């Protein structure tokens, strides 16, 4: 199960950082829906099956029911111009059949995935305050104590280890975090404020972070390499904020469990093969 699936579908701290992606589902799905289809005849009012043609360029048409899916956006000129350029590119020999095929298959994959997740997530009960309090009662150190967290997030593991060595030797954590952020290096850092440890562990960080005192080691996650510092603790004061945050954690966990259940059902009766050598 990946994070994009849990957070997908139609639809505090969410995550410490969101990873940058090269292609979004919305862009892919939008380009697929607006790609048009070959049509016969010359009428621009009606086509077979009584579908209304909103625009046509050569043998490609954009239908009214497709516009209703994605919205009118910038108007007909945007689609017409894009289709003209696309046809010119194809005629110029620029189309890579492999890429075209992949874009269409990937767009369909993401569209169907999001439809399933949207339906599934809409049936999940929203967490209540009592759900949050029940979770808090399971571990008082994680949920009933607030820790003053500082964090540095780095994109390079060797840089993280080097920085940790300097921090252990006495370099100021706050100064290092500020310098990294101002220097616009592949790192971010700063004061996270007082948080219950469970707010972080519930978002994928290890339990040691939730009970941290002092300086952590280098901790890897899907976002990079973290170094944390806790320089103080206090009894829980902002109960309302923590409850709201934990409701988000519970909702994410329920979504994750739902996705795992869907994947288990989908795998039943289907062969899945992966050549690991292709991914290195």
Image (cartoon, rainbow, N blue to C red):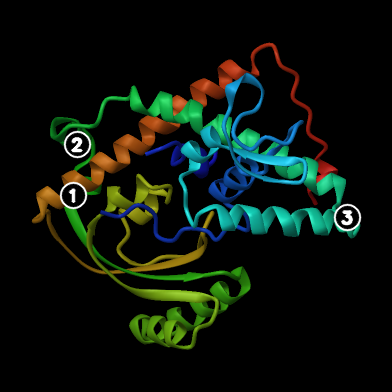
Identify the residue at the far top of this view: 269
Tell me the number on the disc at residue 132.
Answer: 2
| Residue where numbered disc 1 is placed | 242
Residue drawn at x 73%, y 41% as measured from the top left: 60
Helix, strand or loop status at disc 3: helix
State the residue at coordinates (32%, 35%): 251
Q: Nearer the viewer, mark 3 or mark 2?
A: 3
Label 1 SS: helix
Q: In this orientation, does residue 273 appear?
A: yes
Residue of label 3: 91
Q: Quadrant of the N terminus?
A: top right
Residue at 91%, 57% (x, y): give it. Answer: 93
Crowdedness near tag 1: few (<14), some (14–19) or many (≥20) residues, C-alpha within 10 Å: many
Q: Which one is in front, 196 or 66?
A: 66
Percent position of residue 116, x then y? 50, 26
Asked if the residue at tag 3 contacts the one at tag 1, i.e. Cβ–Cβ closer than 8 Å, the answer is no
> Can the viewer see residue 170?
no
């Amino acid at each position: 199960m990946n994070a994009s699936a849990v957070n997908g579908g139609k639809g505090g701290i969410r995550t410490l950082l969101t990873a940058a992606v090269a292609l979004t589902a919305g862009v892919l799905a939008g380009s697929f829906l607006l790609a048009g289809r070959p049509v016969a005849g010359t009428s621009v009012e009606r086509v077979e099956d009584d579908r209304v043609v909103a625009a046509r360029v050569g043998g490609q048409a954009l239908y009214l029911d497709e516009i209703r899916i994605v919205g009118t956006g910038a108007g007909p000129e945007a689609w017409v111009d894009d289709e003209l350029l696309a046809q010119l590119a194809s005629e110029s020999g620029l189309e890579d059949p492999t890429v075209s095929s992949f874009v269409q298959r990937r767009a369909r994959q993401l569209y169907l995935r999001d439809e399933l997740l949207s339906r599934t997530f809409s049936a999940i009960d929203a967490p209540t305050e009592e759900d949050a309090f029940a979770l808090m009662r399971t571990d008082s150190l994680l949920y009933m104590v607030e820790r003053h967290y500082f964090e540095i997030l780095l994109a390079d593991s060797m840089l993280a280890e080097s920085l940790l060595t300097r921090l252990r030797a006495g370099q100021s954590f706050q100064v290092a975090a500020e310098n990294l952020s101002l220097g616009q290096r592949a790192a971010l850092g700063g004061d996270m404020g007082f948080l219950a440890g469970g707010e972080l562990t519930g978002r994928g960080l290890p339990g040691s972070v939730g009970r941290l005192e002092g300086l952590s080691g280098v901790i890897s996650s899907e976002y990079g390499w973290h170094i944390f510092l806790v320089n103080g603790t206090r009894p829980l004061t902002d109960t309302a904020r923590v409850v709201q945050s934990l409701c988000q954690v519970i909702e994410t966990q329920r979504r994750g469990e739902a996705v795992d259940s869907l994947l288990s059902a989908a795998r039943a009766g289907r062969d899945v093969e992966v050549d690991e050598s292709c991914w290195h």
